[in-house]
Amino acid sequence: MPEQLPAGRAGRLWLLDRIDAAQRGRDLLDRKRQLLRRQFDQLALLAAERRHTLNAACVDAETWALRAAMLGGSAETALVAGAVSGQATVSVSWRNTMGARHPEEAHCELPELAPAELAVGNAALRPAAAAYRRALGLAVDVAVAETARQKIGAELQATQRRLRGIERHRVPALQDALRTLELQLEELEREERVVTRWARAKAVR
């Protein structure tokens, strides 16, 4: 035991108090583990759904990009895309779930292509730009869900480790110490009874 165990019957009360505290801690951690597990499973499902939607959006964007390139050439597409390249901004809001800080949602902003920029291109550029804008927003949503899943997963693993530590080590160690102490106290009580009977018998003589 890392703590200093009081002697005698005070030690029994001390151990009972710590066993009770450890069991309450175990119950709290178990409830936290269950909540985190549900949240983790929900986020894993959400991330998978968003990845599926993103994959479809990427296929759509690539299809429109191919059409734009076929109509006007890759140089024209690159020229128009260069007007907004690198200008996307993402704002993220965070929350705390059972001790795990993780992203809750994000908003992606990308400048609109100016009418003059679209005018120099072909008819496929506008829907291609819209398709890529949608794909970019969905990619941000996937990143939010996946990052949140990872953060919740890390907290879930840490909680499971703490719970195992209490269940497999802390509580058994305290219970073993209590059993040992109770045996010692029983032995001490027997010795005290023997001494008391001996003292009374001697007094009678």
Image: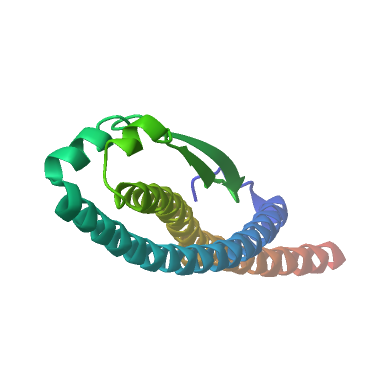
**Does residue 102 show up?**
no
Q: Position of residue 25 (x, y in %)?
A: 63, 57
Residue located 48% across and 58% down the image: 156
Q: Is residue 98 left or right of residue 86?
A: right
Is 32 in front, or is 6? 32
142 is higher (above) or lower (below) than 193: above
**Does residue 91 show up?**
yes
Q: Is residue 60 left or right of residue 150?
A: left
Is 142 in front, or is 118? 118
Colour treatment of the image: rainbow
Residue located 57% across and 46% down the image: 99
Residue located 63% across and 66% down the image: 182
117 is higher (above) or lower (below) than 162: above
Is 93 in front, or is 56? 56
Q: Position of residue 152 (x, y in %)?
A: 48, 54
Asked which quadrant contains residue 61, the reply is bottom left
For the C terminus, the image quarter is: bottom right
Asked which quadrant contains residue 26, the reply is bottom right
Q: Is residue 111 left or right of residue 128?
A: right
Q: Give the total number of marks visible in the rendering.
A: 0
Is 32 in front, or is 149? 149
Q: Position of residue 200 (x, y in %)?
A: 82, 65
Q: Position of residue 32 (x, y in %)?
A: 60, 60
114 is higher (above) or lower (below) than 154: above
